[in-house]
Image: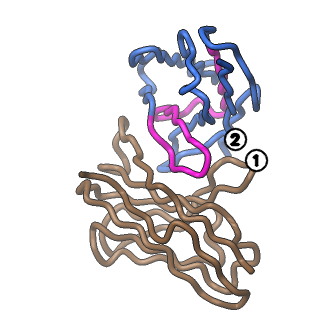
Amino acid sequence: KQEVTQIPAALSVPEGENLVLNCSFTDSAIYNLQWFRQDPGKGLTSLLLIQSSQREQTSGRLNASLDKSSGRSTLYIAASQPGDSATYLCAVKGNNRLAFGKGNQVVVIP
Amino acid sequence: DGGITQSPKYLFRKEGQNVTLSCEQNLNHDAMYWYRQDPGQGLRLIYYSQIVNDFQKGDIAEGYSVSREKKESFPLTVTSAQKNPTAFYLCASSLRQGALSDTQYFGPGTRLTVL
C-alpha cells in the first residue's frame, strides 16, 4: 500500500522567504504526482501535476520536482506572501486512485 | 461557470439517520470521487465512479453507498451503519480516470456532524 509522508507538518516563515515543502512516497510505481492547496474549511485546488516521466513543473512562483527513484517530491514557493498561508497536500496516483499525504500547514508572517 | 458543487455546506445528523450528500459537476467529466477528511489525516477514498451506472469501493466504503445515474451527479449516502460519520466530505471529478495526466478537481466540501 502506498504511503505518502509530508514533512514538516507545520511551518511558519517570514514574508519574502522561499518555501520548501517535502513529500515522500514508498512505492515508486506511480502515474503522476499532484500538489494541492487547501484553505481552512474549503476544498482542494490543484497547483501542479507532474507526470511520472517528468522531472519538474513550474507555474509562476511555484516549482515542483519529482525524483521517482528515491520516492520524493519538493514544492518550492518563491518569495512567499501572506496569501500563500494554507495547507499544501501532496497526492500520488497509482492503481487507479490518489494516495494523499497529511499536508504541510504553512503560515507566512507579514 | 464550470465546476463542482456540493450541498449542503453544513449537515447535522441524529444517530440512526441516513443522510445524502449531493455532488454535481458541469465539467463533462467521466470520473467522480468521494473522499473523507478527518483532522490530522490525509484524504481517504470512499467510492469512485468511472462511468455512468458503474462505481467501485474505495478504501473506507463500509457504511456508505453511492449511485451514478447521471454523468453530472454522484450522491453519497451516509447510512446508520457508519459508526463515526462526523467528518469533512469532499467530492472530486476528473476527465478520465485512467489518464496519466488526469487532474482531479474538487468541490467545496460538506461538513457532516452527528449530534
Is the C terminus of chain A in the top left, top right, bottom left or bottom right quadrant? top right
Q: Colour of chain A?
A: blue
Q: Amino acid at mark 2?
A: Lys
Figure disc tally: 2
Please report the residue visible at 64 percent of the width from the left and 78 percent of the height from the top. B12
**What is the chain letter for disc 2?**
A
> Quadrant of residue B45 in the image?
bottom right
Render colour scheme = by chain
> Quadrant of residue B86 in the image?
bottom right
Based on the picture, tell me whether residue A34 belongs to the magenta stretch: yes
**Crowding at mark 2 (Cα within 10 Å: few <14, some 14-19, many 20+):** many
Q: Nearer the viewer, residue A42 or A96?
A: A42
The magenta-colored residue range is A19-46
Whether A47 is drawn above or below A80: the answer is below
Q: Colour of chain B?
A: brown
Q: Mark number for residue A102?
A: 2
Find the distance from the CA under tag 2 to the CA under tag 1.
6 Å
**Crowding at mark 1 (Cα within 10 Å: few <14, some 14-19, many 20+):** few
> Most prominent secondary structure in the magenta stretch?
strand
Based on the picture, tell me whether residue A108 belongs to the magenta stretch: no
Q: Amino acid at mark 1?
A: Gly
**What is the chain letter for disc 1?**
B
Q: Position of residue B11 (x, y in %)?
A: 59, 74
Whether B101 is drawn above or below A22: the answer is below
Q: Dots 2 and 1: beta carbons under 8 Å?
A: yes
Q: Which residue is mark 1?
A: B40
